[in-house]
Image: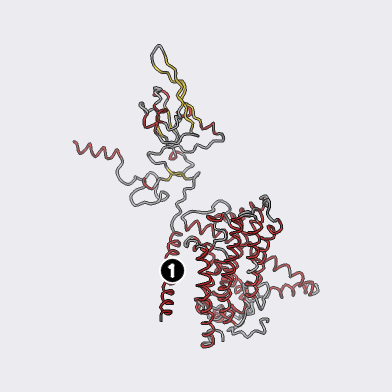
Amino acid sequence: MSRSETPTNWIRMNPGIDLQASFVQALTDLGLPPVAAKILWLPLPMLLMIVGATVGVLASVWLERKISAAAQQRIGPEFIGPLGTLAPLADGLKLLFKEDVIPNKADPFLFTLGPVIVAIPVFLSYLIVPFGQNLIITDLGIAIFIWIAVSSIQPIGLLMSGYASNNKYSLLGGLRAAAQSISYEIPLALSVLAIAMMSNSLSTIDIVNQQAGYGILGWNVWRQPIGFIIFWIAILAECERLPFDLPEAEEELVAGYQTEYTGMKFALYYLASYVNLVLSSLLFAVLYLGGWEFIVPVGVIADLIGVSETTPWLQLITATLGITMTLLKAYFLVFLAVLLRWTVPRVRIDQLLDLGWKFLLPIALTNLLLTAGLKLAFPFAFGG
Amino acid sequence: MKFLNQVKEYAKESVQAAKYIGQGLSVTFDHMRRRPITVQYPYEKLIPSERFRGRIHFEFDKCIACEVCVRVCPINLPVVDWEFNKETKKKKLNHYSIDFGVCIFCGNCVEFCPTNCLSMTEEYELAAYDRHELNYDNVALGRLPYKVTNDPMVTPIREFAYLPKGAIDGHEVAHTAPRAGKRPEEIMDEMDRENK
């Protein structure tokens, strides 16, 4: 189902900037055949995605260290680059130069495959993160579904590396990670389902457009307050952030499934966990906080000052604002995650599974039912 | 009815848990606006407290080679090398040394020294490339440490107990500002005035 076929109820459609069309147009004007122009375009978004995700990780690692330090009345990284901004880069470089050790009696193939399987799906999921009407790698009709499907590959990689490490801590960590991921995937999917039900689409673009038009009042937080909390808790569990970081649990399991890893393989885990955090925050912003929408709808401001929405400079401003808003919202959530990390203690494994199965799952189901009921009763507000 | 009550109780507990987490978050958030207590070591240093037990100072000329320091030391650490001078009928001290790689800085030797030739200094930067360098002889023991307050490269910061009244952070007040309460000499002056 593509966007044009979906029955959406967005208030108005902002054409925005179409980079691909402009790029292809520019190259065809230079005399290239359109097919060649398209092929030239292809690697650009991919490269942009990988670079963007990595820069996002560097920023969030720096933020994590600085915010953690502030919450503990420390200073944090200070001398590596201005305000310590290069500290995560230094971390990465250090890991790059480290010796790659595969423990004796470990299964070398699975041991190497584990981090790869964990890292690829999270990078892949960046395909569906929209920063504007056309500022997205691919506008899939099943975008959110792809994210959920792809992110459930992760526990296989975790289990694989935990098993292949030939270490009891790794095995325990891997098993815990798998159990955790599987049990929190379900409430996560259910709360996303409620959103999809309201927007009649799984496409991230449609989901944002469904929230557009009324500024901050139109965002899904107000329509899905329960789903909002369920989603946040499930996200924290999926990313193995602190209240639910049992698989790593430094104090109990050394480092869980990462215990035997060094060098680039460890770096892949590290990268994947932060990419996942940023990605989840971005999707959280898209699903509940109106994605690229500004607090006041941009269209209204444009009408007020009497500028047409197709004006190039306005489109540029809208696109910039969209990217800024998406990132701001996402990083606000990253901030919240870091703050939570230093506030709540780690739960036990039985408490974790209790919370997932006995609390979140029934609440998520009730929320879904409630949304369905509200959709029938108030189709104008809940996407009839 | 019973089921509804259970649901009510459960909801109540959930709300309470959420409230407590919110309170915790506000505490953490409040900490973010407080000044870091970090003392940035090579550039800032804490002024050691009055009774700080640092590297031991030894005055060679005062020593009577009684070896009390050796006897009170938990591990008999000080090495006192003396010989009996038959003419003066006195012990003559040749060498004295303490190995700070082994010393636990308990201060017993300082406490028991009859002539006060031993004393604790505020020096704590004893890093060396070789552990034998930590074995101080009487010359090394006789050196006085360089004061933090005299070092132009270092910002001295006082510990909490030495701050003026009301101040809670050593970063925020000059280290020369008078501390809370009276200094011993002030108390002495006051007592003198009362006696007159």
- Residue most extreme to the front: B2
State which quadrant residue A50 falls in: bottom right
- Front one among A161 and B122: A161
Q: Chain of mark 1?
A: B
Viewer can see residue B15 = yes
Q: Position of residue B176 (x, y in %)?
A: 38, 44
Viewer can see residue A324 = no
Q: Position of residue A114 (x, y in %)?
A: 67, 60
Q: Amino acid at mark 1?
A: Ala
- Front one among A190 and B3: B3
A141, above or below B18, in the image: below
A297, above or below B52, in the image: below
State which quadrant residue A127 falls in: bottom right
- Residue most extreme to the top: B87
Q: Position of residue A54 (x, y in %)?
A: 64, 62
Residue located 39% across and 16% down the image: B90
Residue located 54% across and 53% down the image: A77
- Front one among A321 and A42: A42
Query: Where's the C terminus of chain B, which quadrant?
Result: top left
State which quadrant residue A13 falls in: bottom right
Residue located 71% across and 73% down the image: A20
Q: Which residue is mark 1?
A: B17
